[in-house]
Amino acid sequence: MDKVRVAVIGVGFWGRNHARVFSELEGAELVAVCDIDVKRAQDIASRYGCAWYRDYVELLQKERPDAVTICTPTITHAKIAIDCIRRRVDVLVEKPMAASIEEAMMIVKEAKKESVKVMVGFIERFNPGVIKVKELIEKGRIGNVVLIFAKRVSRWPIRVGDIGVVKDLAIHDIDVIRYITESEPLEVYAITGSLRHKFEDYADILIRLENGATAFIEANWLTPRKVRTLQVTGGEGIITLDYITQEITIEDDKGLYKPHTVWSEPLKIELRHFIDAVSGKAELAVDEIDGLKALLIAEAALESSARRSPIRLNLRKLRL
């Protein structure tokens, strides 16, 4: 296909960025946007010269897009994704892929049944800094990985109202840890709580990986200043990444070293990859199985906090 005809379902805080990027990508044609807020849908459609809809089913019937991205509240993800899959429309669904493990499993089964591509929006996979960190680990730059520490804190984003900090924030680092280590969690222990919100607004998550390393994730919606950092400690050094600036620091017995980095927009890289995958130019780098596993780990963290005990996992034997 010359251009992938794509639509964005949900053009609120994050979905409008999807619309912007698709309007800029050479391999994509933004044919429509959809939102239950008609004024919002009309404004975005006018800005990028596409059709608008309030009902996504009507959009699917009339526009027949090749692909869609789903940027709606989490509780709506499964139904919309499955409706798209059953129409043989490739899907990118923002994280978390569904509100429950059962819903996520339904998406996985439908995608397999219909042979439809499903990508889950783990944007940090496409952060140039994260990609570089993985490359450094694979080259043995800091020796064997012993500890990974991720910090993802900020004030509560008003856009989020149906999930807590584990599924909204920590799930990014859960996926990054799986990605950079290529190792699955064996055990999860977490402490969570709520000081100001309906759902948990702080979480400390400890993960034991099958490769022997330990990972610790700190996430909250309480901290005034936004911080997004990743630190990887190995037997021969430490790599520190600022997710936001994409700057990397390597520290070892020879001193401190900062590799030259050039900032690139992760969302643009992510959506370009999605378009390439839909058009058959690339294999999906992150799929529905990755989304399911991240959700399983997030749910294990919440269960651990409720039980006040570690939760064992065996994702290698996951039956799909």
Image: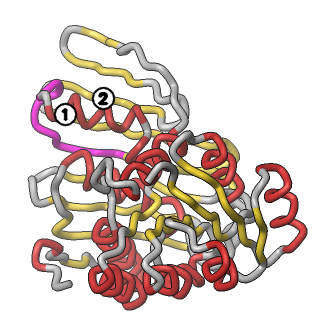
Q: Which residue is mark 2?
A: 239
- 111 or 200: nearer the viewer: 111
The extreme right residue here reads 39
66 lies above or below 292 = above
- The type of residue carrying mark 2 is Ile
- Quadrant location of residue 50? bottom right
Chain-order first, disc 1 or disc 2: 1
Q: Which residue is pictured at 22% across the width and 18% down the height?
A: 252
Tell me the number on the disc at residue 137.
1
Q: Which residues are magenta?
A: 140-149
Q: Quadrant of the N terminus?
A: bottom left
Alpha-carbon span between mark 1 and mark 2: 9 Å
120 lies above or below 56 = above
Q: Which residue is pictured at 42% across the width and 70% down the height?
A: 191
10 Å neighbourhood of mark 1: few (<14), some, or many (≥20)?
some
Q: Is residue 145 left or right of residue 301?
A: left
Tell me the number on the disc at residue 251.
none
Image location of residue 212, percent across then percent down = 10, 53
Of circles 1 and 2, the one toward us is: 1
Image location of residue 296, percent across then percent down = 32, 76
